[in-house]
Image (cartoon, rainbow, N blue to C red):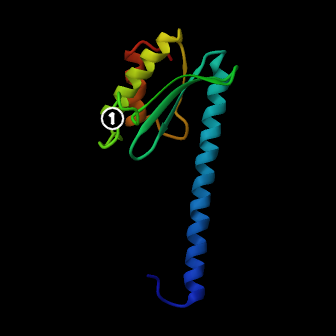
Amino acid sequence: MATGNPAEVFDRFVSAMKASKKLAKRQTRRQFRVRNSVRKSAKGRPRLSVFRSNKHIYAQIIDDVQGITLAAASTTEKVLGGTGTHQGNRDAASKIGKAIAERAIEKGVKEVVFDRGEYKYHGRVQALADAAREGGLEF
């Protein structure tokens, strides 16, 4: 519990809110910057988009021309890990990379553009990308 003058407590609260808004704004800018550069270099290929949370990782292949999702995989699926266990690690990301590659090849997609979103190409994101390459996707 915060102590002190109520005005000081309020000022600390406001400055913390400003900091979180700045962080969110930077993440959004980074995400749009990466996504726009990916779309420019796509040349008609669908993009492999990655989202990661603390507990799970999600991947989907999106056709931006038609605006549809061609294939998707995540650690929330019972087949790929299910609920109840921690699925926010590199091993789980590798499973998702292999699964998304298999599902994409079933749909006839072999070449994609990798969209890392706001995340660095490191750790779980890199593990997913490497597994997707091993599964047969080219990017």
Q: Position of residue 63 (x, y in %)?
A: 63, 21
- Residue at position x 52%, y 12% from top? 107
Please name the residue shown 60% across and 79% down the image.
Answer: 11
- Residue 15, by quadrant, is bottom right
Query: In what quadrant of the picture does the N terminus appear?
Result: bottom left
Query: In the figure, is residue 42 to the left or right of 99?
Result: right
Label 1: which residue? 90
In depth, the one of 18 and 104 nearer the eye is: 104
Q: Camera-side residue: 12 or 58? A: 58
Q: Residue furthest top?
A: 108
> Residue 21 placed where, x, y %?
61, 60
Task: Tell me which residue sits at (59%, 80%) in the image.
Answer: 10
Residue 68, image x and y in percent? 64, 23
| Secondary-structure class at tag 1 | helix
Q: In the figure, 59 relative to 133: above or below?
A: below
Q: Examine the rendering and report whether any part of residue 32 can be seen.
A: yes
Q: Residues within 10 Å of mark 1 (few under 14, many from 20)?
A: some
Can you see residue 138?
A: no
Tag 1: amino acid:
Arg
Considering every residue shown, the one lying at the far bottom of the view is: 5
Across the whole image, how many numbered discs are drawn on residues? 1
Q: Is residue 22 above or below residue 64?
A: below
Residue at x-position 61% and y-position 73%:
14
Q: Work out whether residue 109 or residue 103 is closer to the camera in this orientation and state it.
A: 103
